[in-house]
Image: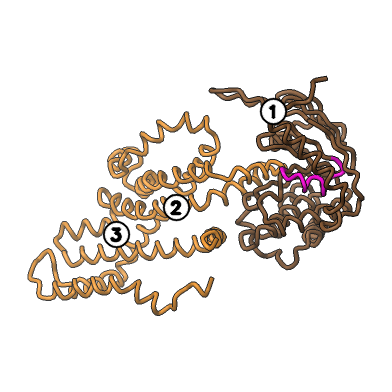
Chain colours: A brown, B orange
Amino acid sequence: MLEVKSLRKVYEDTSRTVEAIRDVSFSVGQGQLVCIVGPSGAGKTTLLKCIAGLLAPSSGDIILEGQRVVEPPPAMAVVFQEYGRSLFPWMSVHDNVALPLKHKKIDTARREALVRNALSAVDLKGVEAAYPWQLSGGMQQRVAIARAVAYEPHVLLMDEPFAAVDAQTRADLEDLIRVLWHRLRVTVLFVTHDIDESVYLGQRVLVMSHAPTVIMEDVEIDLPDERTQLETRSMNRFGELRKHIYSKIQLAKQGWRPPSE
Amino acid sequence: MKALLPPRPRRIAVAFGLPAALIAGWWITSADSQSFYFPPLQTILHTFGKLWFSSKALPNIVPSLWRFSVGYLAAAFLGIAIGVPVGASRNLRNVLEPVLEFLRAIPPPVLVPVLILFTGIGNEMKALVIVFGCIWPVLLNTVAGVRSLDEVLAETVRSYRIGRLSRLQHFVLPGASPQIFTGLRQALPIGIILMVVSEMFAASDGIGFSLVQYQRTFAIPEMWSGIILLGIIGIVLSLIFRAIEARLLGWYHGLRQSQRAG
C-alpha cells in the first residue's frame, strides 16, 4: 500500500546543513495502523510531511499504491497537531468539512451525506453551523478528523494530533481513532511522542532514532484487537512492550544507532 | 455576546457627550462674536440649513461623492489586486519594493498639476488623485495580510489539493481580510481629503470647489458650513464602513473575543 524507500532529507541553509533524516525505509500494508514514535528532534514531522507530499525528499522514494508521491496525493489526508490553526476560522464547521470535497467532483447530495456521516462518526452533533473557535480543543480536533474522514482517503496521516489536548480528551480521541480505523478500514500512519499511546493504538510501532534519523526497530504489537483504556493498559504485555520501546528511545536519546547493514 | 454590550442609552450618551459639550462651548463663546472670520455658530448653522438642504446643494454634493466613490473603490480594487501577488511572492516584492516606496512618498496633492496636464480638469483627474492617495494603505496592508497567513492553514490547503482559484477565494482573501480592512479604513479619510483638494484647483462643481468659491468671495458663514458638512460626510462614511466591516469580519471579532476569553 505505502512504501518508503531509503528516504533521506537534508535541510540546506546559507549558514548550515542539517541532515534530518538519513535513511528510512519501511512499508505499510493495506488497512494497517502503524505508529511512529521517537525522541524530540527525531524528524518525525519531517518524515510525515515527506510522505504526505508536502516536502520534497532529498533522495529516496515514497510509493503510494504503486505511484510515486511528488505532491499531495488525492488518496491521502493529513490531520495536524495544531487543530486551531488548521481549521478555517471564517467558515462554519460544516463548510470546513465540506471544502476539500468541493474539488473532488462529487454531486451536492453525496457531499452533504459525506459531511453528515463524518461528523456523526466523530461524535459531533449539532455543531454544523458553529464556528471552530466557538468549540473546545477536543471538538476542534474532531472536526479536523471529520474533515479527513469525509475526504475518503486510503491513507490517513496523523502528526501528533493529540499532543495539544488534555489527557481525558486524548483518551477519548485515541479510542475514536481505533473505532474509525475499524469501521472505515483505512490505513493509518500515526506519529506521536507518547510511547503509551503508540503501543495502545498501533499494530506496529516504528521507533525512530535521533537525527540524522533511521529506524531503530519495527516492533510488533501483539495485543488483542479489542482494546480498552482500562483493560489493555493494565495488561502485562502492554507493560513489556512499553518498557521495550521506552528503553530503545532512551538509547536513541543517547545517540545510539543501529549497526548499518 | 449580547450580554457584553452595555445598555444602549448609556453608550449613546457616552458617544455624544464630548461632541455635545464642544458644540455647546463653541455656541456660547461665539454667540456675541463680531469677528468677520469667526461668526457665531448660530449664524453658521442657519446658513448650513439654508445652503445644503436647498436644491442648489445636490449639484455640488453628488459629483463630489461620486468622484470619491469611484476613486476609493478603484484604489481598493487595485490595492488588493496588486497586493495579493506581491504579498505572496518574495521575488515580486524584492523587485517592486524600491519603486513602490518611491511612489508612496509622493504627496498626492503635488500630482494634481501634473495630472491636469495629462487628463485635463475633468472627473478623471480628480478620481486619479484619489486613487493615487488611497491605494497605498490598501496595497501595503494587503501585502502584510497575505504575508501573515497561517502556515499550518497553508499546508492544510496544499494537503487537500485545493485549487488556485479556490485557494484565493477561501484562504488568501478571507485570511488577509482583517489586515486589508485596516488598510481600507486608513484610506477613507485620505480619500475625503483628496476629494476636496482635487476640487480646489480646477473644478466647476463639488464641495471643494464651493469651499474655495466661498473663501474667495468672503462668504464666511457659508465657508464654515461647508467645513461642517465635510465633517458630517466623514462621519457618515465611517459609519457605513464600520457596518460593512462588522458584517464581513464578524468571524474575526468572534475569534478575537474567544481568544481573549482564554
Q: Position of residue A211 (x, y in %)?
A: 68, 29
Location of residue A199 in the rendering, given as x and y in whole percent from the top left corner: 82, 45
- Please say whether residue B109 is one of the residues in the magenta stretch: no
Q: Residue at x 25, y 71 (%)?
A: B48
Q: Dot 1, crowdedness within 10 Å: few (<14), some or many (≥20)?
A: few
Q: How busy is the neighbourhood of tag 2: few (under 14 within 10 Å), some, or many (20 plus)? A: some
Discs 1/2, front: 1
* Chain of the residue under the numbered disc 2 shown in the image: B
Q: Are marks 1 and 2 on the same chain?
A: no
Residues marked 1 and 2 touching at CB (< 8 Å): no
Is any atom of residue B160 visible in this view? no
Q: Count the numbered circles shown.
A: 3
Residue indicated by mark 1: A255
Residue B75: give x, y in percent of width and height: 44, 47
Image quadrant holding the C terminus of chain A, namely top right
Residue A94 in view of the camera = yes
The residue drawn where x is 81% and y is 30% is A4
Range of residues picked out in magenta = A193-204
The residue indicated by pointer 2 is B182
How far apart are the two marked residues, 3 and 1, measured between alpha carbons? Answer: 77 Å
**Left or right: A13 as drawn, with respect to A54:** left
Q: Nearer the viewer, residue B185 or A257?
A: A257
- Rendering quarter of residue B18: bottom left
Give the residue at x 31% y 72%.
B53
Q: Residue furthest left?
A: B34
Question: In screen coordinates, is A76 left or right of B233?
Answer: right
Please state which of residues A141 and B118 is positioned toward the viewer in this rendering: A141
Checking the image for residue B207, the label placed there is: 3
